Amino acid sequence: MSLTEWVAALASALGVWLTGRRMLSGWIVTVLASGLYGVVFARARLYADMALQAIFVLTSLYGLWCWWRGVRHAGGQRLHVVRPMAAVLWRDSAIAGAGGLLLAWVLRSWTDDAVPVADAMLSAYSILGQVWTARRFRACWLLWIGVDALYAVLFVERALYVTAILYAGFVLLAVWGWRQWGDRAPDVAKNRNE
């Protein structure tokens, strides 16, 4: 358990909490946390997760842009939660699954990744979670609950105990985020075109 892992864990938890509150600063904190976790995962030989952190930096910048636009269009009010059509969620999930399988093959064939299939599939669905979060889909929180629970198990197996505890905490934060973005909120918007 390195100092880098501790700082990355704290920054990640703060980023998720701020995102659950629909605050733009959550994306900025996530950029910092992702950079730090890139280093942690490189040391643990979790290469898909290391690369995932670079993608998280990019998707966090995308999320910041999307949310900034959303706040600007809402006249400074809270961001609207979006409920896309089920077909969009299924399509995106299938694309993430196919991408995860392709990445697993690459990792198994060309790297010494410790757990290529789990590393690849969790990475693919994490990217999907980031995109759905950026697009303000409430379903992102359900996806994060599943992904984070599986990540907690993976990190225990890789002896990244601080990160495992963090991801167990992320499950709780995702449940909280789901409730925060719930149907009873006065600012929920239906958007069938997302």
Image (cartoon, helix red, strand yellow):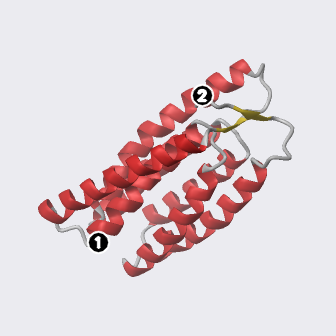
Residue 143's spot in the image, x, y percent? 56, 57
- Quadrant placement of the N terminus: bottom left
Residue 119's spot in the image, x, y percent? 34, 64
Mark 2 is surrounded, within 10 Å at the Cα level, by few (under 14), some (14 to 19) or many (20 or more) other residues, namely few
Q: Amino acid at mark 2?
A: Asn
Residue 13's spot in the image, x, y percent? 60, 58
- Quadrant placement of the C terminus: top right
Of circles 1 and 2, the one toward us is 2
Q: Residue at x 55, y 55 (%)?
A: 12
The single residue placed furthest to the front in the displayed view is: 87
Cα separation, mark 1 vs mark 2, equals: 37 Å
Q: Residue at x 41, y 61 (%)?
A: 122
Residue 82 visible (yes or no):
yes
**Taking 179 as reference, is 88 above or below it?**
above
Residue that mark 1 sits on: 115
Residue 34's spot in the image, x, y percent? 45, 50
Tell me the quarter of the picture where residue 87 sits. Answer: top right
Which tag, 1 or 2, sits closer to the chain's start? 1
Q: Indicate left or right for 71 with 105 as reference.
A: right
User: Secondary structure beneath disc 1?
Assistant: loop
User: Secondary structure beneath disc 2?
Assistant: loop
The single residue placed furthest to the left in the displayed view is: 110
Q: Indicate left or right for 128 with 74 as reference.
A: left
Mark 1 is surrounded, within 10 Å at the Cα level, by few (under 14), some (14 to 19) or many (20 or more) other residues, namely some
**Taking 168 as reference, is 143 above or below it?**
above
Q: Which mark is residue 11?
A: none
Q: Are marks 1 and 2 in contact (CB under 8 Å)?
A: no
Total marks placed:
2
Q: Amino acid at mark 1?
A: Val
Residue 10 visible (yes or no):
no
Residue that mark 2 sits on: 193
Between residue 88 and residue 45, name the one nearer to us: 88
